[in-house]
Image (cartoon, rainbow, N blue to C red):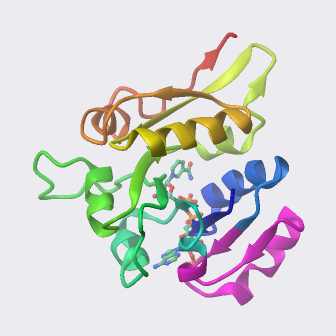
């Protein structure tokens, strides 16, 4: 599956490394432009390439991995999503004011109309995203949430393929609340003993 990342920092690199390792091409993008990503794509190997944010966002499975303060700008002005999947890895730090009952990932979904948003990876510290999720005692649990069952099924398959033990935490409202900063699944690092 064609993959893209919006953001090319610690989290995006960790996820991209897992994806290319099992054969998925990944276009990485950042704020400063593709020329700044040469070393990173060299490290990741031939399935990785650098592109603009719009090129990365055109992939079938797109990972949003920018700081919370950059979410709005990073998603602004992109071509229509037409149901492509956007995986929100962000943590809303500092906690945003004025969301009301809305969760952080519902806010993200509002910035990407037409995208099928899945929240994932935000609960894990970057070093546990980057590590091989297959530990001697079991696979790293990877919680995810979303409102579209098809998008969640696709994400579940990819997460399983790259070695995590994916766990559906529910909708962007209910699961998102459990997973976001301050929720009980945030920073919960656990292994599934298969
Ligand atoms: N680090 C962790 O342990 C961890 C774990 C789970 C989730 N998270 C969350 O994941 C997100 C990313 O964290 P990170 O540690 O990977 O951050 P990071 O290393 O600072 O990388 C942030 C990336 O976002 C890019 N960016 C910023 N504004 C952009 C824009 N308008 N358009 C496109 N790209 C833009 C930056 O590009 P430039 O370099 O060009 O500015 C950079 O590549 C954050 O929301 C964080 O809370 C972090």
Res 124 seen here: no
Q: Position of residue 93 (x, y in %)?
A: 35, 55
90 is within the stretch colored magenta: no
Q: Position of residue 183 (x, y in %)?
A: 32, 32
- For the point 16% across and 58% down, the residue is 97
Residue 87 is left or right of residue 29, and the answer is: left
Tell me how many marks there are.
0
- For the point 89% across and 65% down, the residue is 45
- For the point 34% across and 65% down, the residue is 114
Which quadrant would residue 182 be assigned to in this image? top left
Assign the N terminus to one quadrant of the image.
bottom right
Which quadrant would residue 41 be assigned to in this image? bottom right
49 is within the stretch colored magenta: yes
Instruction: In the rendered view, tell whether residue 178 sits above or below residue 98.
Output: above
Res 113 seen here: yes
Residue 65 is left or right of residue 127, and the answer is: left
Instruction: In the rendered view, tell whether residue 182 sits above or below residue 140.
Output: below
Which quadrant would residue 7 be assigned to in this image? bottom right
- For the point 28% across and 36% down, the residue is 177
Instruction: In the rendered view, tell whether residue 119 sits above or below residue 84.
Output: above
Q: Position of residue 53 (x, y in %)?
A: 55, 80
Assign the C terminus to one quadrant of the image.
top right
> Which residues, given as a range, are shown in magenta?
27-55
Instruction: In the rendered view, tell whether residue 166 sits above or below residue 180.
Output: above
Residue sticking out furthest to the top:
193
């Amino acid at each position: 599956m064609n993959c893209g990342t919006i953001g090319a920092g610690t989290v995006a690199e960790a996820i991209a490394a897992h994806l290319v390792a099992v054969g998925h091409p990944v276009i990485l993008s950042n704020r400063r432009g593709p020329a700044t990503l040469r070393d990173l794509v060299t490290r990741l190997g031939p399935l990785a390439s650098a592109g603009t944010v719009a090129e990365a966002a055109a992939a079938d499975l797109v990972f949003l991995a920018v700081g919370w303060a950059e979410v709005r700008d990073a998603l602004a002005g992109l071509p229509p999503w037409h149901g492509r999947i956007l995986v929100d890895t962000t943590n809303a730090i500092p906690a945003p004011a004025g969301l009301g009952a809305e969760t952080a990932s519902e806010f993200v979904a509002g910035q990407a109309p037409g995208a099928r948003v899945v929240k994932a990876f935000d609960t894990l510290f970057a070093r546990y995203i980057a590590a091989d999720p297959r530990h001697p005692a079991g696979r790293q649990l990877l919680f995810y949430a979303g409102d579209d069952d098809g998008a969640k099924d696709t994400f579940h398959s990819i997460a399983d393929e790259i070695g995590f033990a994916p766990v559906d935490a529910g909708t962007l409202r209910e699961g998102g609340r459990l997973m976001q900063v301050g929720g009980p699944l945030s920073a919960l690092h656990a292994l599934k003993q298969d």
